[in-house]
Image (spheres, rainbow, N blue to C red):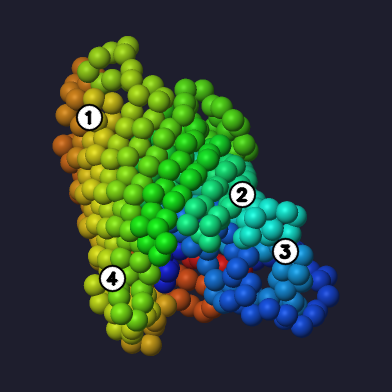
Amino acid sequence: MNLSCTSTKNKTLFSLSALTLSLFSAGVAAQENKYSCEQLDKLNTRSQQVVTAPSICESLIGDPGGLRSQLADYGWGAQLSWNPTILYDLRDQQRDPQEYSGQNFTWSQSMALNLTYDLARIGFTKDAQFTFSAQWATSNYQAGYPRLHNVATLAINQPLLDGQVELQYGYYPLIRQFYGMILGGNSSSAALGPTSVIPVQVGISLNAPTPTFTFIARDSEKRFYNNFAVSRSMSPKGHLDDVEQNPWGLKWHVDGANPILVNEVGYKREAQEDARSLWFRAGGIYNTSHYDYFDKPGDSSDNYAFYVANTVQLTQPQKGLPLGLYLDTKVNYAPDDRNAYTSDFQVTLFDIGLFPGRPQDMTSLGYTRSFISKKFRTSLEPAGLEAPQSINAVSLSHALRLVQGIYWINGITWQDNPTLVPRRDDAVLFQSSMYWNF
């Protein structure tokens, strides 16, 4: 389980500080709250396919002084959030320099602002929406987390034919359009970072957005779908290099990054009175960027990966609601001659509303096993280095809703081989984060 990304509806933890919020709303004249929170939700961003923006009903401030209602009158929506996190290896294996997240006490925080506009007001098709998102993130572990001060999304989302066709174009990260990384997640990412997630390893954009065009087709019931995107890949040198080359997030090109194609087919059904929630998907990724071969020094080639994932609601304590026990499984593959992580499987059980009287809490238990390429391990031998054959991680976490708009997420992960190279003793990582949705 990616411990920093969990809530009652599996929403990504966006963020912005309370100070910024107070400055934003200061001096606004009070007016009657004209719209309900459900009506205001229609202006939440739709720029992400696998992540739903938090409801205004779950906002810490709601509609302060009628500010959101006033913005809605002009077609604008706004959300602010903040996510501070700490991570530490309870086995106290500190080193200088730090080699993995949590080896030394690691803190990070991210802040984000989402603004949307109803483009139908200026002549676009019905429900067309513009999204602008800005983000800021810092950490004391500079080698593990990028320091961000960039545009995260600058995109137009345009449904057609009553939502059976959906277009999106602009700048946005691909990882939130496919796969569902945070749903169940990769528990080993607590120490190894997102490069251990195979779709990210082969170039799907993560932190900095990439210029992208997405085309989604759905059946008449909007359950079966095909999601296709063409984009620029991340830098083949990884997400940290990508952010360094593209600090503001709007560069058309970065060195070494060529077009990437992603296609996902799936079936998605929300919880209903007579049916449980189900989301099956399978996808392929083809990156035309050049990745160095491990067994052919000086030679390189394009890259690719495949994945299959399924998220199914096993129990439904209340008919028609998403409460209950879920099983999320994922299998990934990438060629072993140019990728250190060549395959993995993930199994996560998570329960929404496990404890009586706590319907908006979420508890997760996950296991991940990642297999390391033999060709990669062989390539290290001349340098006297050794990498493990596989990496295992078991993670337990709980997201506690403190009050409307504030979650406190705590978790613990046991992981063997918390570093890919050099090999280190097992780690027991404690992670604690807060999610403030304004």
Q: Residue furthest top?
A: 298
Residue 364: image tag: none
- Residue 364, picture quadrant: bottom left
Q: Earlier in the sequence, mark 2 or mark 3?
A: 3
Q: Is residue 403 above or below residue 344?
A: below
Q: From mark 2 to mark 1, how far is it between C-alphas? A: 37 Å
Where disc 4 sits, the SS reads: strand
Looking at the picture, which amino acid does disc 2 mark?
Answer: Ile
Judge the density around disc 4: few (<14), some (14-19), many (≥20) Cα neighbours within 10 Å: many
Q: From mark 4 to mark 2, how far is it between C-alphas? A: 32 Å
Image position, residue 237 (x, y; %): 42, 28
Viewport quadrant of the N terminus: bottom left
Of residues 228 and 432, the one drawn nearer to the viewer in this rendering? 228
Quickly name the residue at label 3: 75
Of residues 122 and 175, the one drawn nearer to the viewer in this rendering? 122
Looking at the picture, which amino acid does disc 3 mark?
Answer: Gly
Looking at the picture, which amino acid does disc 4 mark?
Answer: Gln
Q: Earlier in the sequence, mark 2 or mark 1?
A: 2
Where disc 1 sits, the SS reads: loop
Quickly name the residue at label 2: 156
Q: From mark 3 to mark 4, how far is it between C-alphas? A: 36 Å
197 lies left or right of 31: left
Q: From mark 1 to mark 3, how far is it between C-alphas? A: 50 Å
Q: Do we see residue 264 in this rendering?
A: yes
Quickly name the residue at label 1: 336
Q: Nearer the viewer, mark 1 or mark 3?
A: 3
Image position, residue 378 (x, y; %): 18, 23
Q: Do we see residue 115 in this rendering?
A: no
Quickly name the residue at label 4: 313
Would you say the residues marked 1 and 4 are in contact, meaning their CB atoms lie under 8 Å apart? no
